[in-house]
Image (cartoon, rainbow, N blue to C red):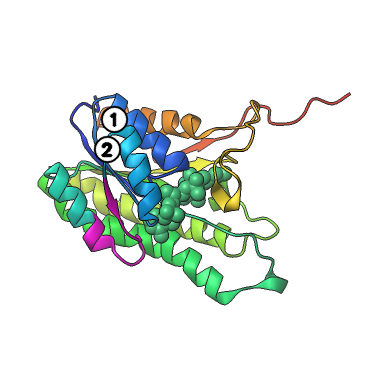
């Protein structure tokens, strides 16, 4: 389907992967609203891209974020549940508050945003929810207790929503990026880009390809790895 005039809300659209998705969707004619917690960074991105923004924390202000987006767009066709973050912590160093905070955004926030989107997608006769998961949603690793478990939960919710929502013409698509060079995890977003590793635009390209499929069908899950991220040897 064409994205021309499609109404899209991208959570966590002020930086990284969400920003790249918002920019690419807008370039294809979509009407896009972005969201994030840091109002200053959000406003700067919105001004640069020429987009409308609604500030707020998806884990705490989901209803308000959705109301602001729908008021601007006049409805909703696509929710991109992209807002997310994580920190590495081994079981020995378990920080319960940090784990709860990560789950509040990555799990509860995604669920609250999706629930808030439903009446508007129903009014539109259907639509699409994209859940930005991770390869960490498929395999645990050292230090992944909080983050990887939250993405496993998002993967589980994706399957639940697919079962519930297909009869309402709502597609739910899970994207699993491998490592992407963004500000994720406290990395410097301005660092030198390794041309062998993924960038946000790669994930935007994959996400938009899935969105553009005719609504008759949908891609339940899409995983993106860098082809050859390793330094040459010898
Ligand atoms: N980069 C990777 O290697 C990678 C790999 C796999 C999956 N992912 C996933 O991809 C998504 C985007 O990550 P990224 O790499 O683009 O990270 P990023 O550059 O740090 O951007 C994260 C975005 O989410 C927003 N955000 C975080 N918590 C939020 C909350 N509670 N409510 C609203 N907005 C919130 C941030 O803005 P504020 O901080 O101002 O709120 C920012 O706009 C995440 O779900 C992440 O788990 C990333």
The total of numbered circles placed on residues is: 2
Report the side of 170 relative to 41 (left or right). Answer: left
Which residue is drawn at the image coordinates 68% and 31% (left, top)?
A: 229
Image quadrant occupied by the C terminus: top right
Q: Quadrant of residue 99?
A: bottom right
Residue 125: give x, y in percent of width and height: 13, 42
Determine whether label 1 and label 2 are within 8 Å by CB. Answer: yes
Rendered position, 94 above or below 105 = below
Question: Circle 1 sits in a helix, a strand or a loop, which is it?
Answer: helix
Taking the view exactly as shown, the residue that stands out farthest to the bottom is 96
The answer to whether one can see residue 189 in this image is: yes
The answer to whether one can see residue 157 in this image is: no
Q: Which of the marked residues, 1 or 2, is nearer the chain's N terminus?
A: 1
Report the side of 223 relative to 194 (left or right). Answer: left
Which residue is drawn at the image coordinates 22% and 61% (left, top)?
A: 64
User: Which is more toward the observer, 47 or 223?
Assistant: 47
Which residue carries the number 2 mark? Answer: 51
Badge 1 crowding class, 10 Å Cα cut-off, few under 14, some 14 to 19, many 20 or more, is: many
Which residue is drawn at the image coordinates 36% and 64% (left, top)?
A: 59
Provide the residue span drawn in magenta: 53-65
Is 63 part of what is drawn in magenta? yes
Residue 203: give x, y in percent of width and height: 47, 34
Is 16 part of what is drawn in magenta? no
User: Which is more toward the observer, 56 or 161?
Assistant: 56
Callout in the foreground (1, 2): 2
Label placed on residue 73: none
Residue 230: give x, y in percent of width and height: 74, 31
Question: Circle 2 sits in a helix, a strand or a loop, which is it?
Answer: loop
Which residue carries the number 1 mark? Answer: 26
Residue 231: give x, y in percent of width and height: 77, 29
Q: Quadrant of residue 13?
A: top left
């Amino acid at each position: 389907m064409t994205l021309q005039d499609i109404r899209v809300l991208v959570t966590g659209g002020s930086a990284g992967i969400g920003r790249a998705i918002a920019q690419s969707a807008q370039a294809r004619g979509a009407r896009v609203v972005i969201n994030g917690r840091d109002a200053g960074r959000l406003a700067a991105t919105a001004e640069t891209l020429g987009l409308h923004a609604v500030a707020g924390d998806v884990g705490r202000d989901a209803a308000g974020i959705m109301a602001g987006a729908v008021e601007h767009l006049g409805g909703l066709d696509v929710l991109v549940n992209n807002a997310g973050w994580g920190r590495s912590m081994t079981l020995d160093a378990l920080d319960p508050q940090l784990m709860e905070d990560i789950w509040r955004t990555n799990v509860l926030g995604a669920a609250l945003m999706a629930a808030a989107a439903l009446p508007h997608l129903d009014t539109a006769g259907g639509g699409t929810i994209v859940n930005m998961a991770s390869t960490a949603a498929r395999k645990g690793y050292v230090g992944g207790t909080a983050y990887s478990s939250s993405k496993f939960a998002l993967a589980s919710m994706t399957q639940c929503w697919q079962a519930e929502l297909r009869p309402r013409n709502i597609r739910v698509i899970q994207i699993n990026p491998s490592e992407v060079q963004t500000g994720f995890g406290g990395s410097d977003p301005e660092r030198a880009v390794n041309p062998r590793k993924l960038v946000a635009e790669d994930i935007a390209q994959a996400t938009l390809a899935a969105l553009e499929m005719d609504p008759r069908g949908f891609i339940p899950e899409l995983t993106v790895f860098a082809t050859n991220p390793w330094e040459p040897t010898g």
